[in-house]
Image: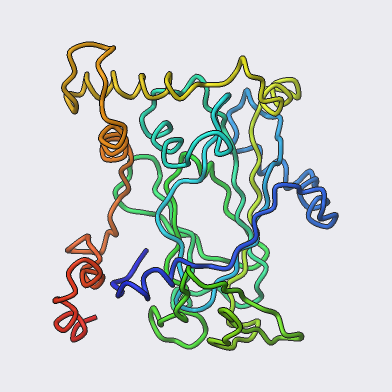
Amino acid sequence: VSTQSTGKTATSRLQAFAAYIFDVNKWPLIKELFSDETFLNHARSVCPPDKQYLDPFQMNFIMQVPGQTVATHTDAPYFLGATRFHYPQWLLVAMVHSGLFQEYFIDQVQVVGYFHEWEATQERGGAFVFWRYTARMPEHVMPVPRAGTIVDGSKVIHAASVYNGPGGQVAPKPPVIDKSRVCALHHDGDDAWHVECDGEVLRRYTTDDLRMAIVYRGKCFVDEAAAARFNADRPEDRLSLDVILQKFKMDLWRKRVIDIKNETSTVEPLELAMHIIDTYIRYPHAPSSYLPLNYCSLAKLYPWTAAVLDLIC
């Protein structure tokens, strides 16, 4: 799923070029696709049998240049009364992984489709990677043009293998994408593209060089009324932060992660946050790795290691 990389290369691999759209109606062609009954039937197959009403809420365009990938993750989850517009996503992800808030959880479906035209091969890479429930080894689905993969991305851990591009090189280095600069992938017309940061052209590409994906996300509800209740975001449905943290705190106490005298005892906020992350958010390591750490980025923490690492990374 990943490869050993120095700090700048590692972060640049993850800086795909994306547009996140929360109003699907602004794109008539995409709305038509998402309304197609064949598409909807496939999408509903991931929803629970008793929640077949689909409420589309997000569309993403994801463009990648050779050398880029997608980190192992789960998508932003939604709960009745707790969403990314209320709380940080790391807390919502921990809520899913903990299993403590299942009664409020909103099932969803993610369809990842591809609109590049090149033939998908193992050598070219860029596969959709996912872990089926508690499986140790991931499964791979090649990015076949005009095909897609359907999962509940808020529950299924997934990623992408490194997109090698057409050149034949394994895990080529992408252009250095510095998050402190304004960087974008620009279309120059016809088949010409370039990556630019603060007006500086870093690298040029053709359409055939790019991995192109479109992502549909919809929530699964029992019926339209249930969707309307969620979208109304009523104050009486809100899951307060105090309630969420208290539930975590008591579960951590039962697991003997924290030592408190009773349920009214306090824990320092940062300490509690780190315990929540360390206890509940666990992602699988790359299956082919003997040392499941990106040691090539060690110089970011210990600069004196750079001279040695430069010889092997």
Q: Give the residue displayed 19% in from the left and 18% down from the top.
A: 260
Question: Looking at the image, which is closer to me, 111 or 81?
Answer: 81
Does 250 sit left or right of 96 as displayed?
left
Color encoding of the figure: rainbow
> Which residue is found at the position 67% from the left and 47% from the top?
58
Position of the N terminus by quadrant? bottom left
Residue nearest the viewer, comparing 244 with 54: 244
Residue drawn 44% across the image and 57% down it: 159
Residue 257 found in image quarter: top left
For residue 133, side relative to residue 237 (left or right): left
The picture places residue 91, in percent across and down from the top left corner, at 42, 36
Q: Position of residue 255 (x, y in %)?
A: 20, 23
Q: Residue at x 45, y 66 (%)?
A: 14
Q: Is residue 209 above or below residue 247?
A: below
User: Measured along the vertical axis of the image, is residue 189 above or below residue 228?
Assistant: below
Q: Residue 89 location, x and y as percent? A: 47, 41
